[in-house]
Image (tube, rainbow, N blue to C red):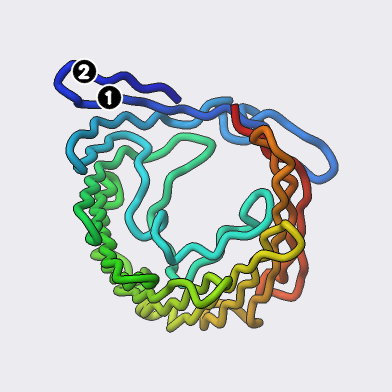
């Protein structure tokens, strides 16, 4: 990713990803699985709290506080929302348009998938140590999320999040997360009870900063369909 700012204070930027993926016990390049090594690019312009994105955009509900991702890789990026448009980290992606706006305690995000003709939005309002959020989606499928609610914040040393989604014919979903500091590490617990899963999903993730932008992270959870997944590794920023 990269960005530049004009003399007038407008930031222009773009990002693109290259990655490998796994196939059984082997690593294969993304071109083998998806026909290309790079994902579709995202472009943006931002000024005064307003951001416009085009291309492989950050979709409103997918990138909201509803996310219950844990571990190094997200372990499925669980959420109460169902069948929503999302930023794609590999492969070709339908072009989208997204607008974000933030002013004081209020923030709003609206996005549109130009191929599937899906519009979604998510808005939040922060007050004290707490945040309330509301999401809505308009699509052509009865199995997509219709609306979602979020409430989260901090109580003492614990950060928590509670979420609910009405997913149309796919049913309802309730989720909760709790994150606490323990012996210098951050431990995040999550639980998701969704009609679209056979089992209730439970998981825990741990991250520990080693300094210099290096973080040790891992997690484990069940999939909601009778199996268990986990990950462990190191992430770093520079």
Reading the image, the residue beneath label 2 is 6
Q: Quadrant of the N terminus?
A: top left
- Across and down, in percent, residue 93 comes to 41, 38
- Across and down, in percent, residue 52 comes to 22, 38
Q: Is residue 229 above or below residue 159?
A: above
Q: Element type at marker 1?
A: strand
- Across and down, in percent, residue 233 comes to 77, 44
Give the residue at x 23% y 51%. Answer: 102
- Residue at the far left: name it: 8
Q: Quadrant of residue 228?
A: bottom right
Q: Quadrant of residue 129?
A: bottom left
Of 140 and 130, the residue lying toward us = 130
- Say which label, 1 or 2, has the lower sequence index: 2
Of 91 and 78, the residue lying toward us = 78
Of 181 and 81, the residue lying toward us = 181
- Residue at the far right: name it: 25
Q: Element type at marker 2?
A: loop
Q: Residue 112's mark? A: none
Q: Residue 12's mark? A: 1
Give the residue at x 43% y 83%. Answer: 172
Give the residue at x 32% y 55%. Answer: 60
Left/right placement of residue 219 relative to residue 61 reads right
- Across and down, in percent, residue 195 comes to 52, 83
- How many marks the image carries: the answer is 2
Give the residue at x 78% y 50%. Answer: 232
Residue 21 visible in the displayed image: no
- Residue at the far top: name it: 7
Residue 152 visible in the displayed image: yes
Left/right placement of residue 201 relative to residue 113 reads right
Labelled pair 1, 2 in contact (Cβ < 8 Å): yes
- Front position among marks 1 and 2: 2
């Amino acid at each position: 990713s990269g960005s530049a700012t004009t003399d007038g204070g407008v930031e222009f930027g773009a990002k693109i990803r290259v990655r490998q993926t796994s196939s059984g016990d082997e690593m294969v390049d993304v071109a083998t699985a998806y026909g290309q090594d790079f994902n579709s690019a995202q472009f943006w312009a931002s000024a005064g709290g307003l951001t416009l994105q085009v291309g492989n955009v950050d979709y409103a509900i997918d990138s909201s506080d509803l996310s219950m991702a844990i571990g190094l890789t997200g372990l499925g990026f669980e959420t109460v929302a169902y069948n929503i448009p999302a930023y794609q980290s590999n492969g070709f992606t339908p072009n989208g348009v997204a607008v974000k706006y933030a002013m004081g305690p209020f923030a709003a995000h609206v996005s549109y998938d130009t191929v599937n003709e899906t519009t979604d939005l998510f808005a939040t309002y922060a007050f004290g140590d707490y945040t309330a959020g509301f999401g809505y989606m308009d699509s052509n499928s009865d199995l997509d999320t219709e609306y979602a609610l979020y409430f989260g914040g901090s109580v003492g040393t614990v950060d928590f999040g509670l979420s609910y989604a009405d997913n149309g014919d796919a049913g309802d979903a309730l989720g909760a997360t709790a994150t606490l500091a323990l012996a210098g590490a951050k431990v995040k617990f999550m639980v998701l009870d969704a009609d679209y899963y056979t089992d209730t999903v439970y998981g825990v993730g741990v991250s520990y900063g080693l300094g210099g932008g290096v973080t040790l992270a891992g997690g484990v959870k069940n999939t909601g369909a009778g199996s268990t997944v986990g990950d462990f590794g190191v992430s770093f920023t520079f």
